Image (spheres, rainbow, N blue to C red):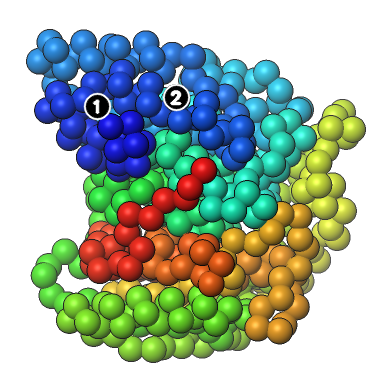
Amino acid sequence: MTQDIIFSDATRLAELIRTREISPVEVVKAHLDRIEAVDPKVNAIVTVADGAIAAAKKAEDAIMAGGELGPLHGVPFTVKDSIDTEGVLTQRGSPIYKGRTPDADATSVARLKQAGGILLAKTNLPEFSYWIESDNLLSGRSNNPWDLSRTPGGSSGGESAAIAAGMSPLGLGTDLAISVRGPAAQTGIVSLKATHGRVPMTGIYPRAPRRFWHVGPMARSIRDLALAFSQLAGPDGEDAFSSSTVLFDAGVTSDRKLRVGWMVGPGFGPIDTQVAATVKAAAEALKGEGHHVEEVRIPALERDFALDVFNKIHVMEMKPAFREAVKGHEDQMYKMSKTMLSLPDTSMDDFIAAEQAAERIRDGYAAYFRNFDVLLTPVLPVPAHKHGISELVVNGETVDLTYLQGATVPLNITGLPGLSMRFGTSREGLPINVQLVGSWQAESTILRAASVLESVSPVRGLHPEL
């Protein structure tokens, strides 16, 4: 029964709890036992919430009393350690913030609790959420449950590893350029980066600049993403980017067949042949289900390499926040702080040129979505890589490790929604995910397409052995 609990999705757990087939206490204890058993190998968990068992008992009492139950009643969830949690350590992956305990929940955490969820633990990340491997001076390096010598990604790598390893059914991560979709791909789970502003960033570090930052759900199933997103979305009156009054989506809600384009480049940098084959297989699967599918190109991505555009804009905007964070604590800086502060400032001419390039990329996607409902792409150019590398070799071409973000960062520049889900396996037995992209505020469209793929997926039900 314990194995069934730890690898069930959140929706199933909520059903079992609601029908009194299992208790919230039983579910929480099963996950705590799993953390104790496997986290010494994975190092995904930073802090276990002291109040988890007490919250589970309270949830059980509400069931016995016949009270009104939320859609996630009694279901545990975990949270990346850059997201504030009331009374539970939130240390941002840095000894500079060691011992920091917020007095209020981030909006996203509060909303999952309002839905009946129980905060179980906080998960590991890079220093200040800035890198594509989850490693820091305070809590060390997280490992990939599929192969401990490899990374679960960053910056939400602890979260992805925890869910993949059965330590959590549902969690929250943040995404600046890759950070919920990439880690999901490296560990074979699912994640959603909704349209920018759909989920408030209130109570999440760093708060400024926020125009590329997102917070989103990470889970085991597409229905869990839909359920979590339905609870998370909507303005909170504090994050000015979160202003949309659209309650759920502006996507294709009819039963008509979807118009799907797929591409593996150009515009993303080099893509491994196994990854490209997985994207094509997903496209063929959608076609086999009766949807209109064709290979496409987006010229704007070929004219302006989105990763270069992002770097020129964001480095300029982020360096002041880094300087402020480490002021007086320079001896406690780790790799990314040192790297960020060593980068040359973007010239004003280059900054303006990058802003104009970003607008061209947005326009390019807008033109694409006049004729299509979904764009199917890689998430990453390669499956999960070994720890500590600085370069990738992809199809014989050597590129900087930052190229890992080539297919994900365009959605941060544009604010478009993107979903990461597994659809393949590498020759080494590692997960390969694909990315589903929708038009602005059309989350239901990619959730619908993802549900179709999930129903015919060749990798359903696979879990790492630890």
Q: Is 365 situated above or below 225?
A: below
Label 2 and label 1: CA atoms lie apart by: 18 Å
- Left or right: 165 as drawn, with respect to 155: left
User: Is residue 198 rendered to the left or right of residue 100?
Assistant: left
Identify the residue at image location x=76%, y=60%. 389
Q: Kindly identify the amino acid type of the residue bearing the numbered disc 1.
A: His
Q: In this figure, which residue is indicated by the disc labeled 2?
A: 32
Q: Is residue 82 visible?
A: no
Q: In the displayed structure, does residue 51 sit left or right of residue 308? A: left
Neighbours of disc 2 within 10 Å: few (<14), some (14-19), many (20+): many
Please give the name of the residue rendered at 77% of the width and 35% of the height, measured from the top-left corner: 137
Mark 1 = which residue?
73
Q: Is residue 121 left or right of residue 41?
A: left
Q: Which of the two discs, 2 and 1, sits closer to the camera?
A: 2
Residue 138, by quadrant, is top right
**Pointer 2 with pointer 1, Cβ within 8 A:** no
Q: Residue at x 65, y 83 (%)?
A: 395
